[in-house]
Amino acid sequence: MKKEPKLMGFAGYKAGMTHVVMTDDVPNSLTSGMEISVPVTILEAPPMKVAGIRVYNGTTNGSHAIAEAWTTELDKELNRAIAVPKKQDLPAALAKIEQLIKDGIARDLKVIMYTLPEKVTGIPKKKPEIMENNIGGTDLKARFEYAKNLLGKSIGIGDVFNNGDIIDVLGITIGKGLQGPVKRWGIQIQKSKHSRAGSVREIGTLGPWHPSHVSWRVPQLGQTGYHQRTEFNKRIMQIGKDGKAVTPEGGFLNYGIIRNDYIIIKGSVPGPVKRLIRLRPAIRSTKQMPVPEITYLSQESKQG
């Protein structure tokens, strides 16, 4: 059975956390059918724009980009991130991609999208983030026609995801700089008489003399945080357009007021506030959850 083409990715900015009261709809749960309090993360998701189409071939050395087509309707802010192509023959570029697909040379297709951070008052920047998002589907030609219709258009979060969807979130964790093995790996602090080097916050040994090699398993100091992480199977609780409905009194700490579309995700997501969070349909989930029944969303002040 052929799957219809669909955009498989979006991005938003982390605003903060709060909690909701919802009806527990997990089968066989001890609180099934009862109202429970659930922590949630709120992302501000302004529209994204489709800048171009890029196709790849498949070789024994991996995929390589072989052609791309850029729209002529690009925001001037995009110049902050890349050198925007000035002379672009869009019909010729699209015709080349179509011929590559027809000849069987092109094996994959993605769209180039960029964010619009200037629409977000809580983000102190105007430079867009550029990313590739996949177009789902089984027919490459149908995916290409679908991508052509998106070219140059503004895409909202509601065009990609729905309430109750299971998604994966990708983000960069909070950076903590160079840290020792106690904080980085949770090793035990030595007793004072056991440390002859003068520090009780170090490991007792790097390993044996033979083989004379330090294993990667040995906990040592190093970069902690600011790592890219993917969290699987997060549930979308709600998608909305009125940011006032979720903004707490006084705004979110270190963020402010949500003025664009928003998305509420169950649980936490990686990274501090203001950081970009990428969203995609879950690749490991096998279940489809119903739309959550939310009875209350806390808008109490986070100022303390």
Image (cartoon, helix red, strand yellow):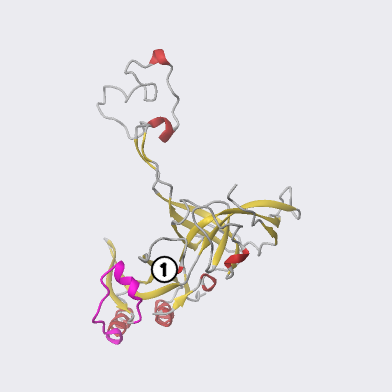
Name the kind of residue labelled 1 in the image: Glu
Please, what secondary structure does the residue beneath circle 1 have?
Answer: helix
> Camera-side residue: 302 or 265?
302
* Residue at point 63%, 61% (across, down): 289
Give percent across and percent down for residue 81: 30, 66
* Residue at point 60%, 60% (across, down): 287
Q: Main secondary structure of the magenta part?
A: loop
Q: Residue furthest bottom?
A: 91
In the depicted structure, whether residue 109 falls above or below residue 250: below
Q: Quadrant of residue 94?
A: bottom left
Q: Quadrant of residue 84?
A: bottom left
Mark 1, residue position: 118
Q: Quadrant of residue 235?
A: bottom right
In the depicted structure, whether residue 283 falls above or below residue 207: below
Give percent across and percent down for residue 224: 38, 41
Q: Which residues are magenta?
A: 73-92
Local crowd size for mark 1, using a 10 Å CA cut-off: few (<14), some (14–19), many (≥20): some
> Camera-side residue: 18 or 4?
18
Give percent across and percent down for residue 147: 41, 78
Is 88 included in the stretch rendered in magenta?
yes
> Camera-side residue: 44 or 236?
44
* Residue at point 34%, 22% (across, down): 205
Is 25 included in the stretch rendered in magenta?
no
Give percent across and percent down for residue 226: 39, 47
* Residue at point 52%, 59% (across, down): 256
> Camera-side residue: 130 or 14?
14
